[in-house]
Image (cartoon, rainbow, N blue to C red):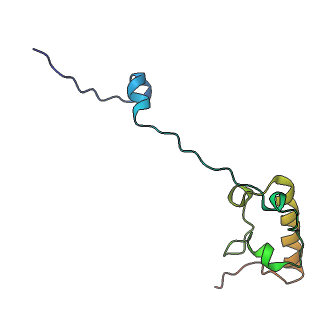
């Protein structure tokens, strides 16, 4: 009498190696490239509102580099330029109206 046992495992470590790897696939995520490194003609300037506006969210926050793909150096320059544009009233500090 051959009985098939269907075991329920509490953790993934208790499963045999073949069952652990069976349902998983590695998803290749494409690395984002810094726009300013890729296009040398694109400059960060506090007076260029169209360029700076792409890196600000709808609520007026500066988008992080993990979202935009900027390198650390250009993200710092972009942050300074956005803050300058806000102080000169070219960009709003916030867009939320209460």
**In the picture, which quadrant includes the C terminus?**
bottom right
Residue 9 vertical placement versus 94 (above, below): above
In the image, what residue occupies the spot 38% across and 28% down?
19
Residue 23 vertical placement versus 86 (above, below): above
Residue 94 shown left or right of residue 17 in the figure: right
Can you give x and y, in whole percent of width and height, for residue 86 in the image? Answer: 84, 78
Q: For this rendering, which residue is in front, 37 or 80?
A: 37
Can you give x and y, in whole percent of width and height, for residue 25 in the image? Answer: 48, 39
In the image, what residue occupies the spot 13% across and 16% down?
2
Query: Within the image, what quadrant is residue 62 found in?
Result: bottom right
Going by the picture, which residue comes out furthest to the left? 1
Residue 24 vertical placement versus 85 (above, below): above
Can you give x and y, in whole percent of width and height, for residue 94 in the image? Answer: 73, 78
**In the picture, which quadrant includes the N terminus?**
top left
In the image, what residue occupies the spot 67% across and 75% down?
59
Q: For this rendering, which residue is in front, 50 or 95?
A: 50
Residue 7 shown left or right of residue 61 in the figure: left
Can you give x and y, in whole percent of width and height, for residue 8 in the image? Answer: 30, 29
Residue 30 shown left or right of residue 47 in the figure: left
Q: For this rendering, which residue is in front, 83 or 25?
A: 25
In the image, what residue occupies the spot 84% across and 65% down?
78
Residue 69 shown left or right of residue 72 in the figure: left
């Amino acid at each position: 009498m051959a009985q098939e046992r269907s075991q329920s495992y509490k953790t993934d470590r208790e499963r045999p190696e073949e069952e652990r790897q069976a349902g998983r696939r590695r998803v290749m995520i494409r690395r984002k490239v810094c726009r300013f490194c890729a296009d040398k003609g694109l400059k960060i300037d506090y007076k260029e509102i169209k360029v700076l506006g792409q890196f600000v969210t709808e609520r007026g926050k500066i988008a992080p580099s993990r979202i935009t793909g900027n390198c650390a150096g250009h993200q710092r320059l972009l942050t300074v330029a956005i803050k300058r544009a806000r102080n000169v009233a070219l960009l709003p500090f916030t867009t939320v109206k209460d």
